Image (cartoon, grey):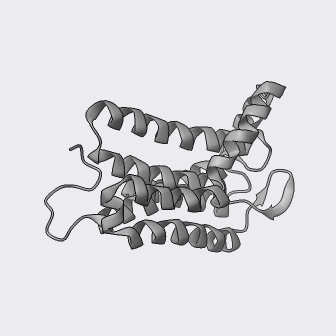
Amino acid sequence: MLAGAAGFLALALAAIALPSVPGDPAVREWLLARATPPVVAALRVINYAGSWQLLIPATLLLLVVFPRARERWWVWIGLMLAAPAAEGLLKILIGRARPEDPSMGFPSGHATAAAAFSGAVFYLAASLSPPARILVRAGAVLTIVLVALARVILRAHWPADTLAGIGLGIAFASAAALLAEPAGSAEIAGGGR
């Protein structure tokens, strides 16, 4: 939780204090140079993995799939409501425009959503068998990375916007995992079972 929050805070301070986050234009141009039509087409589909319209029903599916999620269902529903509320408020407070649009883009909503949801999946996967846990957790991490790349390559965000969204989403998912732990549990949230 602290790493995600610290990463978000460092990027937010850079976005507020500096005219441009160091490395943002160069990384963006490097990624856009590799945006072939098939890559762009694939990322347009992957982009939906950060869409709240998809992730709210997917959160309900988590409640069906994972008994631990059903035990404290309000935590996971709350996560998927609190993360976008915070992201929207932070966009207004920070006021950093997108690269090709005057609307506010810091932090990326899609990256925040993907990281919050995938962070929940990562935590809940602790109840799975080791091979399944590894696959599900790898898929969760890959989803976060691909959604962040999609937002940059689809020209919606600066790289720092997506990294900040990941940090914010992970911080919220980590807080939810801590809240979801039964009272008095000695297990550290997200620890391997």
Q: Please tell me which residue is depicted at 35% across the width and 64% down the height of the picture.
A: 70
Image spot of residue 164 (x, y percent): 58, 54
Q: In the shown orientation, is residue 141 left or right of residue 30?
A: left
- Work out whether residue 79 or residue 163 is closer to the camera in this orientation and state it: 79
Residue at image x 40%, y 32%? 135
Give the number of callouts: 0
Residue 91: image location, x then y, percent: 68, 68
- Looking at the image, residue 61 sits to the left or right of residue 13; the answer is left
Is 155 placed above or below 171 here? above
**Residue 189 in sight here:** yes
Asked which quadrant contains residue 24, the reply is: top right
The N terminus - image quarter: bottom left
Reply above or below: 85 against 111: below
Q: Position of residue 179 (x, y in %)?
A: 31, 68
The front one of 133 and 109 is 133
Q: Quadrant of residue 175?
A: bottom left
Q: Quadrant of the C terminus?
A: top left
Q: Position of residue 29 (x, y in %)?
A: 78, 34
131 w.r.t. 8: above or below: above
Residue 36 can be seen, yes or no: no
In the foreground, 165 or 127:
127
Q: Please indicate whether residue 133 sits to the left or right of residue 181 in the image.
A: right
Residue located 62% across and 70% down the image: 90
